[in-house]
Image (cartoon, rainbow, N blue to C red):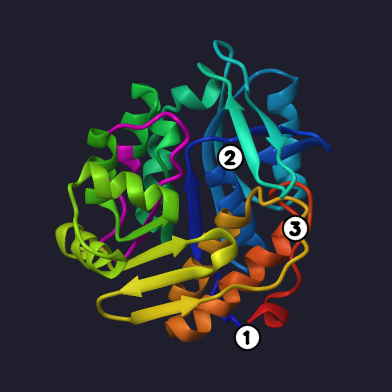
Amino acid sequence: MQKKKEFLMVGIGEILWDMLPRGKQLGGAPANFAYHATQLGNKGVVVSCVGRDDDGVEILKTLEKKEVGHYITSTDRYPTGVVTVSMDEQGIPSYIIHEDVAWDHLALNQEHLDLAARADVVCYGTLAQRNSDSAESIRNFLSHTSSECIRLFDINLRHHYDRATILTLLQTATILKLNDEELLVVREFLDLEGDETTVLEALCTAYDLELIILTKGGQGSRLFSPELGDSVFEGEAALVVDTVGAGDSFAAAVATGLCMQLPLEKIHPFAAKVAAYVCGFSGATPELPPLEELL
């Protein structure tokens, strides 16, 4: 199946260097999302902030090399973001996320707001809400999106979150993405009872969500929608080097499928195949095969 339209997909929030055991890699969930959106034939764009330092210069050069669009500002006051990443024996990462860095202080201009109005998809999470500067900017950006825009809240709970932030961001979302551990946190915060399906139904009803993406690691994933249906997929077999960026690539693939108006039964194995491919490489941003080989 050929993809005819290039959709504008924005990742807003953190951009940084993942300091992996095998070397430095471009990272940050919104940046990873924009990269994979680009790889899947869309116009992927990162909105973030870097320091006016060597790491910041290298990020901008790397985005240009990877042909990822960006509306990235620079600052003299804060350094470019860095995350120290370690891996367990299964390739599951743990993170030390350094604080008070450039992306904590994202500021918008009119070009950012014009971009928001044109976006087909915006992906955002909780981490970049840890500082009020970026939190205010991201919420302002979302408020300027159109009613047709897919607002994908990829919750990404990384030690910097609270109940109020999650509730606020749920209210802006049309799609919620989370993993099985994060679902337990959300369930407790919202005092939801019942089995998994009951909780997903309650979330969709309470926040008018069009879709919930629930990932379960090696146990597969679930796409749950009141309108589009309920798809459970056991996952793709993969030789795992590490899982960094796999969830971001899954989100980009789901967003691509939705923009193409594919059914869930087509979108789900496509997204799982993309994520499994990413797991076979070190770092979040390997080059993907052509879209027609993945669909």
In terms of secondary structure, where does tag 3 sit? Answer: loop
Residue 170 falls left or right of residue 278:
left
The mark lying in front, picked from 3 and 1, is 3
- Residue at left 65%, top 51%? 68
Image-quadrant location for residue 40: bottom right
In terms of secondary structure, where does tag 2 sit? Answer: loop
Q: Which of 161 and 289 is in front in this view?
A: 161
Q: Earlier in the sequence, mark 2 or mark 1?
A: 1
Q: Which of 160 and 105 is in front in this view?
A: 160
Looking at the picture, does residue 94 appear above or below residue 240? above
- Which amino acid, mark 2? Gly
Q: In which quarter of the image is the C terminus?
A: bottom right
The mark lying in front, picked from 2 and 3, is 3
**Badge 2: how crowded within 10 Å, few (<14), some, or many (20+)?**
many
- Residue at left 51%, top 77%? 233
- Residue at left 42%, top 62%? 214
Q: State yes or no: discs 2 and 1 in contact (Cβ < 8 Å).
A: no
Residue 204 falls left or right of residue 149:
left
- The residue that mark 1 highlights is 2
Q: Earlier in the sequence, mark 3 or mark 1?
A: 1
- The residue that mark 3 highlights is 240
Residue 51 image position (x, y, % from top left): 62, 20
- For the residues marked 2 and 3, what is the alpha-carbon distance in whole angstroms? 20 Å
- Which amino acid, mark 1? Gln
Q: State yes or no: discs 3 and 1 in contact (Cβ < 8 Å).
A: no
| Range covered by the magenta-colored residues | 139-162
- The residue that mark 2 highlights is 28
